[in-house]
Image: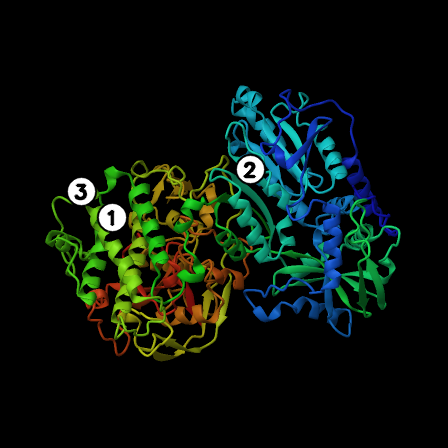
Amino acid sequence: MTPPPPPPPPPVAYPESAKNALKQAAVSSAVNGGDNHHPSSPPTRLTCTNDCDFSAGPGFTLHRLIPEPQSNNSDLNLTSLILSAFRTPTGPDAEPNDRDSAEDAYGRKVLAQRLNLASSQCNYSLPSYLLYDARGLQLFDALTRLPDNEYYLTKHEADLLATGGVADQVANWIEPGAVIVELGCGSMRKTKVILDAIEMAVGKRGMGAQFAASPVMFYALDMDAGELEKSLNALVANPPNPQGWQFISFHGLIGTYASLMHALPTSPTHAPRLILWLGSSIGNLTRSAATSFMASLRASLHPTDRFLLGVDGRNPPAMIERAYNDPQGLTRAFELNMLHVVNTYLDPAANLFDVDKFEYAGVYNARAGRHEAYLLAVEPVDMVIRGKSRAADDQQLGGQEVRVTFAKGDLMHVEHSYKYDVMDMAKLIAGARWSMDRTWGDGAYSMHLLAPIADELGGFVFDAATASGQGVPSVDEWEQVWRAFDMMSLKLVKSEAWELRPIEVRLPVCFYVGHLPCFADIHIARVFDLPLLASTRYANIFERGMDPDLDDPTQCHTHSEVPDTWPAMADICAYRDKVRARIRAVTAQLGSRSDGAATAKDDNGEARKVLCMVFEHDLMHLETLMYMIAQFPTHLLNNAADIGLPSASVRMAGQANGRRLEPATTRLFPAARVTLGRSRQDKGSVWGWDNEFPEHDVQEVGPVEVQARQVSVGEYAAFLDAHMDRKDFVPAGWIKSDENQPAGGWQVRSIAHNTYLSIDRNEEQVANWPVCVSKVMAQAYAKWLNNTGNDRSRHGEWRLPTEHELRMIFDSAPLIDPSTTGFSGLRLAPMPMSVAASPEKAFAYAGNVWEWTASPFLGQDGFVADQRYPGYSADFFDGKHSVVLGASWATHPRLANRSTFRNWFQDGYPYAQIGFRLVRSV
């Protein structure tokens, strides 16, 4: 039985602007008679009709989803949840912030100081969805209509939809018969922008007949049937053109998120589905709960479906607090309305909670990145509450009583609103196994089009919780890396390109398919005293790659023979599979110890060290393969989406995509003592390469002024426009769309799209990517910047940092989140750097691309070559290679999160994922 409506909240003296907002909200929600404007096709039932019932509405259909399996009476279930919240009080969901685990209660401490409370006690917490009864929905809609300087979220999202290109680009992606489902739809004012765009785009695309035959089916989900019906009526009655809604049919779903998972609509044409979750509603969930929800949603979708998510950024605290405590009092009325809802579900006649004894109190917890809403007891409360069942045949809750007490100043948690910056988003989608197709926004508010990763491809995504560890790799970790390498080398690259060299100074793809197992075969056979699986020929041609001198390619270190004819790929893969079977066997033979200690089966730990060396060798060559692929012509690659790569991006119609970056902010680092390298007695990991040892101190590094982010693609393009005659400054993978164009017209290669992206139009935010160049190019850029006259100060000239300086920078800032840094299979390009990033946030982009240093690659003081692989480092102490630090989007987490790991490249090498930031001495 549906509960009676809650009693009206106490009157609030609203200013005139708030009254107008409430009036406008009421008008938009009013039931309109209107004509039936939806297409004339019959109403579409959900495919899972056993999970819902069906009724018709004026211009739309309504479906009531069954409650979650744990209860066959949703009203009773809510009553039980409320009683449980008071019977066993736990306070707010405790979720230690991953950036500062000791500050989960920081917001309440600030609130206690601000309100002069004796303590920040908070014993009780109620589920936030109790805020959204009919009255709550009306108050919230009124809140979203306040001026931008009072409540900014709605306008920011509406601007992205209407003028930021989101709606138009989504509309051009929609196919005939597609299903669109909106979660927690509310008034659907912003949704209408997308639906209008779809209707209008059909004609422009010349697809009227197809969409008329198979209309788009829009489903709006909400808990309150009355408000859902009102919103659908208002939507149906206001089509974007006089002909009415021609290509969209409308349906309402009455239920919760959980009940939707059991009855998610599907398309009869098998067209991709689009799930909408607008308004930063995800912020009502803790970060862990948001990850769990998105993971369960992903499991309900197909790889071709998409999810459009709106999220609020970590904006200035004053801006956020004003939005959540508006001067009109609408937020206060909205939060206090929860007490009326609680009274309704407990015992409507008793009116157990006296609203006059509570006040709203909100605070932004900047350290946790969330706004926290509480109800504050303004006087002591001591009462007994009880549940009164409204089910005539069920008295289960009728006699239950719970004593509830509040001291004056005690808090009751009712809602939190988490904010997401770029690193928060990266962690969310990685943890829930989504990939980023498209993103819009400038950091203050953003919208993201996400693609679900199919379960069968789950192994392609590295589990950062284990992958960043430094122990002996498990069989599962090997399998993940093998799956990634095979997909990139044998599926993304077309077979006709396997024997081609995309980079002249590197060997063809088929070499690397054979090199990885051959390297493993040789070292594992040696340490385990086993016969080689390779033939003599394979050992001769696959043991070691090449890195010739760029100035004189005839000069090169010792490397394997380069044959005139390579073995057939089928034969190489058969050899590869034999080696992989041996790796599985020896890994199982060694047992499960992961700390590198010697065991009865590995007396001195040597076998474990060899397995770690072979594994990390594979990881480095996986990254090599990634940047090599980017140099292939587009016709030699399959589209990532066609082969099911989880990071495949959907190119959408439209050009501009967000603002360009402002000039990089800087940060002053005082002089500091820097420790480089690591001790050979380090017990924290099994393995390290010879150039990581030994540990030694360097003093008097700094003070130095540092750019807070890497130089961007857009900034480097301006440098190129000033050097049109220097073809040697053009990065690998860049082309000119028009060679006769005096400036601009640059395009950047993207393997995610298998195409070139325009810098001028900032497609896919490519202008805000960190630029990848050689050290020679980076130094030329620094010289140009110093000569422009636009960036002079009392400090010295801009230059590349030394290895010691960059190590100091990385060690002095919260740079790398282990769950997001490095290659995870979630993207095939760098993350665009945020327009609005503060210096602290921008430093988090370390790990997006490697970074050049000014330091030549040499051994640490006391360097000793590792006799397992003596030429690994020593062959390149030639003065022509320089140290690069950090990691890139293509780096495995194991390497990305080891601070002593050093990489190196020739100064003129332009192909790797290496960027740079500049420093100057103070």
Q: Name the amino acid, label 1.
A: Ile
Q: Is residue 845 visible?
A: yes
Q: Secondary structure at mark 3?
A: loop
Q: Secondary structure at mark 2?
A: strand
Which badge, 3 or 2, is on the more N-terminal residue?
2
Q: CA distance from mark 3 to mark 1?
A: 21 Å
Name the residue beneath numbered marker 1: 503
Q: Is residue 380 left or right of residue 543?
A: right
Give residue 393's position: percent from left, percent from top.
Answer: 79, 45
Name the residue beneath numbered marker 3: 568
Give residue 309's position: percent from left, percent from top.
Answer: 58, 45
- How busy is the neighbourhood of tag 3: few (under 14 within 10 Å), some, or many (20 plus)? few
Asked whether disc 3 touches disc 1, contact meaning CB atoms under 8 Å apart, the reply is: no
Residue 274: numbered disc:
2
Q: Is residue 647 visible?
A: no
Q: Which corner quadrant holds the C terminus? A: bottom left
Q: Name the amino acid, label 2.
A: Leu
Residue at x 19%, y 68% (from the top left corner) = 870
Which badge, 1 or 2, is on the more N-terminal residue?
2
Residue at x 51%, y 61% (from the top left corner) = 665
Asked whether disc 3 touches disc 2, contact meaning CB atoms under 8 Å apart, the reply is: no
